[in-house]
Every structure is written in structure tokens, then in C-alpha cells.
Image (cartoon, rainbow, N blue to C red):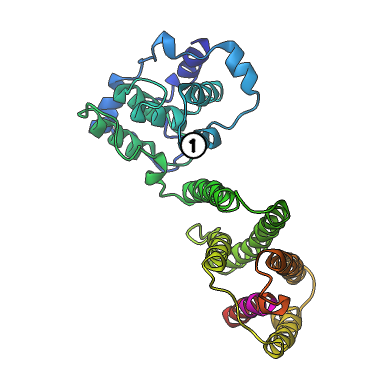
Amino acid sequence: MLALAAAGAARAQDYPNLEDYPGARADRSAEWYRACMKVKDLQPPRTDAPSAQLVAALGECDAVDLYYDTQDKPAATPADWDKVRACAVANDDHAVLTMLYANGQGVKFNPALALHYACGGNGMAIDPRDVAEDMVDLQSSAHPPVPPYDICDNATTARARVLCGQIDEEEADNADAQKLETLSRNWPASQKQALAALRAAAAAYADAWGDESDQAALAAQGENPDTIGEERMRQKALFMQDIANAERGILPHYTRAQYDALDKDLGAAYMESQIPEGGGQGGQADAVVNAMDTTQHAWLAYRDAWVAFGKLRYPQVPGYAWKAMLTGRRLEQLEEDDSDE
């Protein structure tokens, strides 16, 4: 309770708090502003205050990550939500506290308290005026919203979209992990191990290719958060689709000659990609080549992990067929990159 009181005192001088949203102004005649002022001094019930022991046990926690991880649990317990609330209180995370009280997650549904925290800002560059207006609308409801209220629905700034995009990606990763665990539950240990190695290689390749694509997008278009992470998530989704297809019997069919031709074309395309436009060296040109090298090495590891996994799980498919499938895709990536320059 002392932590909550201290947080409230710290923000009192700039309530409503618009400091994380450049250019925002507090219109004293607006409905949201008047509503904020009505709940300015509102405090949560004493029973909602986390114990000092629980706060200490959590250590250095991230309330946003913990919130979404708990929300994604098939059956989150009251104790799980207690940890989320304790972490949010310890870090003065108004975004999470807004969602907890707006959704009645681990606490009694309380739109007024949700509004109080919404008016205090959120640290995610999400316009608190929009969030406050949502909470004002929620005042007339007797029940939490379905689906649960998500502050990221108001992400309009570049920084907010990037942060919320990262949250979406992490949720997708967790869902993928659960799907693969369910899928492989009855597999032999050797196949489970090969799948784990393949997924790790897939993630490393998606990260490398995603980073390279993000750098290219930023260099070409300036700050462009709508595409940041797009290629990384697309590659991860493609990996999951490949696994699903293989389990349904949709397997690659290539001849060795087809693979040899694709591999030759890939080698030529890769060598050409190592020569920056204009043939320059140093600075940005070197950075581009280094990023390409990182991606290529990650792709080779990913390709080989597919071959190793396929040999165990789908022995009827020759290794060169997996290589051909993945080489064709990698070739398309390099050709697309070349056409974009």
C-alpha cells in the first residue's frame, strides 16, 4: 500500500500524465479530463496491496511480459494474477494496472480504478487520452469486457506499435511452443530432440533474416514500425506451416538434379548480393554485407537442422529434397532483395 501511495504522490503533479505522448494537451473541458480528475485520488482496497514478501520474491520482473504470459495460460490461478499485480505495483506499471482492473483479473472489476491508472500514463507511448476514454465508456458496464481489454488496441505511435508488435510476437512464440509440445508428445526421444534443435535453428534464422529486413526497411523508408518484425514473424509462421504440412503428409518432392540447379543459382545470387550497389566498401556497405553473412550462416544451420530432423521423422524423404525446398525459398529472398535495391 505504501508503494501505491508513493507512486500516486509522484504522479500527482502531472496528473493526467501525458509526458510520454509528445504533443498531447490536457483539454480541461474534455469528458476524459473531467473523468480523470474525479478519480485522481482514488486508491485500491487494502486487500489488493501485495505483500512485501511477494514483491521481494519476484525480484526484477517485467510486469508487461508477466501480464501477457499469465493471460495466455490455459487456467491462470488467483496466485498467478497476484504475482502480476505485485510486479506492476513494484514497477509502478500503470498500463498493467489499468488492464487488471478493467478486466477484473485477480481483482474485483473496478472501472474507476482502471480509469485512475489510465490517467496516470502508461510508459508505452500509447495516448492516455484514448485509454481514459475507453475506461470512461467502461463505467456503464457491470461486467468485464469480453474479450479482455488490451491497451495495445490504442497503439498509434511508432514506439507503441513496435512495443505492442513485440508482445504479439512473444505470444505467438508461446502458442507455437505449446502446439509443438502437443504435436510431439508421443514421439520417440530422438525425434523430440531433433525437433527442438530444428526449432532453435528456425528461430535463429528468423531473427537474422528479420533483423536484416528491418535494417533495410529503416534505411530505405526511415522509421517504419508497421513493417518492423514482419519478416521475422512471417518466417516463424512458415516454419510452423511446414511442420503441419509434413505431419499431414505434404512433403517436398525434388530430384537431386533440381537441388543441384537451385544450389548453383543460390551460390551465384549470394555472391552477387555481397557486392553493394555501386561497389562501395566501408561503413554502411560493410554493415549490409555482414548482416547478409549472418543471415546466410543462420540459414545454412536451419537447412541442415531440417535435413537431420527429416531423416528421423520422415525417412522416405531424401535430404536433398528438404535442401531443395529451402534453397528455393532462400533464392527468392535474395532475388527480392536485389530487386528492391
Q: Specify the quadrant that holds the C terminus.
A: bottom right
Q: Residue furthest right?
A: 282
Q: In this image, 251 relative to 135: left or right? A: right
Rendered view: 148 above or below 229: above
Q: Residue at x 55, y 49 (%)?
A: 182
Residue 335 locus on image (x, y percent): 62, 82
In the rendered structure, does residue 326 fall within the stretch colored magenta? yes
Magenta-colored span: 323-329
Frontmost residue, 47 versus 319? 319
Asked if 213 appears above or below 143 in the picture, the reply is: below
Residue 207 belongs to magenta span = no
Question: Principal SS element in the magenta part?
Answer: helix
Q: Which residue is mark 1?
A: 73
Q: Quadrant of residue 111?
A: top left
Q: Amino acid at mark 1?
A: Lys
Of 69 and 38, which appears nearest the observer? Answer: 69
Q: Is residue 312 left or right of residue 122?
A: right
State the residue at coordinates (61%, 12%).
Answer: 53
- Where residue 192 appears, as percent x and y from the top left, is 68, 53
Across and down, in percent, residue 36 comes to 31, 25
SS of the residue under disc 1 = loop
Structural crowding at the residue carrying mark 1, measured as other residues with C-alpha within 10 Å and reported as few (<14), some (14–19) or many (≥20) = few
Counting the numbered discs, the total is 1
Given residues 270 and 319, the one toward you in this image is 319
220, above or below 254, in the image: above
Would you say 276 lies left or right of 170 here?
A: right
The reply, left or right, for residue 147 in relation to residue 261 is left
Q: Nearer the viewer, residue 78 or 32?
A: 78
Q: Residue 44 location, x and y as percent?
A: 39, 15
